[in-house]
Image (tube, helix red, strand yellow):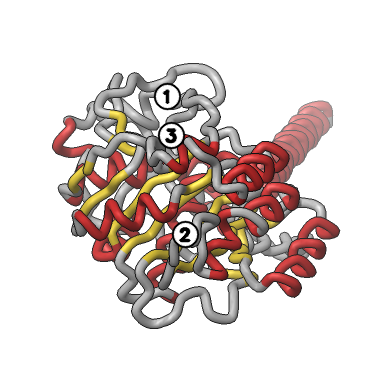
Amino acid sequence: MNIAAGRCRCRCLRRQSCYVISVYAATVILLQNCLIAYHAATRGDPSDATIVTGGVDHAPTASTVPPRSAVTSSSIVVPLAVVAARPTAQQSQQQQHRPGPPLTEKEYYSRRPHKVNEFRHQSVLVPDRLCQPGAFMVILVHSSPTNLDRREAIRVTWGNAVVNGTWPDGTKLSRLYLAFVLGLHADDSVNRAVREEHARHNDIIQGDFVDNYRNMTLKSLFDLKMVETHCPGVQYFIKSDDDMIINLPYLVDILAARPLTSSFMGPYNPRSRVFRDGVWKLTSEEFPFNFYPPYESGSAYIITGDLIHELFVTAEYVPHIFVDDVYVTGILGRILGVNHVRHSGFAYWGTRTPTACDIVRRTIVTGTKMHPQRLCALWNDLRLNPKC
């Protein structure tokens, strides 16, 4: 009787131990699955990453395509193998752009095998007829959406000479066209004011990207797209800032005396050191060399019409840097073997402000630091036909 009772107690103890072990194992598995599910939910879906347009080597540019809204469901069971296999967008980008061996100059200054900067941006505003057939020159002035005063000053001074075809001294100008190039502003009331301005003047090209200095290269490539689309066959394209004056009669005579092909002309920089700090900072990953290739400063420079298409297409195969003049006239120029035509009279950033006599005597081709009051004052001096 005691032996039977002891056997019964042993069997009961074994059953209790098995039950405890089973409950413990089930609890561990349940907690493990909960942790896996939580980890999977917080990883996110790589396909929901914000789309970035532009070079992979510079700060992201705000896209015009909104990210998809995330969809979650507590009733969906995600297989463990799928959860473990899908990296996040950030992890994928880190793997894709993990630093490799330094590029040689030959490797850096070459088209990549596949597109790295597919250009997808479109125009929001564009003049009815940016150029007429047989255009000699189109001038695109880079301006900020808020710089209405600068645009108005150009419209009543040298921009008016482009539209009306007459310089203050009576010199006739023909087949020249001008427009202002802007991006979008974060404040929609500013964009609305730009649309009203364009309705009055019909001289604004606006792209569907944010207008800021990190998008300067994007803006310059947008220029090329607009010129190729709306001014096919134009002989020359000038990119200018909105604080400039261009001595158009002198420039037209220069180009008539020496027609150019496959060339840039402007403020020439044969060997400029790269900034590693400050506003124009580039890291060694963005640009691996200590000196830029020869390039033209972006205050105002000329591109011959036969280069427009090749520059735009090549840019899709070459990583961007945000310093637009270096990228377009320096990096792309070197890859395409473009000529840098040197001519005195083009303004650099530190060049002094020109006078009316500098224009009359043809000592300058372009002038800088021409803020609205200064530009209007100089233009009034020119209209008085100064004796220099």
Q: Which of marks 3 and 1 is in front?
A: 3
Q: Which of marks 3 and 1 is nearer the N terminus?
A: 1
The reply to whether dot 3 and dot 1 touch (C-beta < 8 Å) is: no
On the image, the x and y values in percent for residue 380 come to 65, 46
Of the residues shown, which amino acid type is indicated by label 2? Ile
Of the residues shown, which amino acid type is indicated by label 1? Thr
Residue in view at x 79 percent, y 28 percent: 6
Of the residues shown, which amino acid type is indicated by label 3? Ala
- State the SS at label 2: strand
The residue that label 3 is drawn on is 347
Residue in view at x 21 percent, y 56 percent: 257
Residue 350 vs 113, above or below: the answer is above
Disc assigned to residue 353 = none
Q: For the residues marked 2 and 3, what is the alpha-carbon distance in whole angstroms?
A: 16 Å
On the image, the x and y values in percent for residue 61 come to 57, 48
Q: For the residues marked 1 and 2, what is the alpha-carbon distance in whole angstroms?
A: 32 Å
The residue that label 2 is drawn on is 139
Between 199 and 185, the residue placed more toward the observer is 199
Q: Which of marks 1 and 2 is in front?
A: 2
Disc assigned to residue 283 = 1
- State the SS at label 3: loop
Q: Earlier in the sequence, mark 2 or mark 3?
A: 2
Query: On the rendered structure, is 72 left or right of 268?
Result: right
Q: Quadrant where the N terminus lies?
A: top right
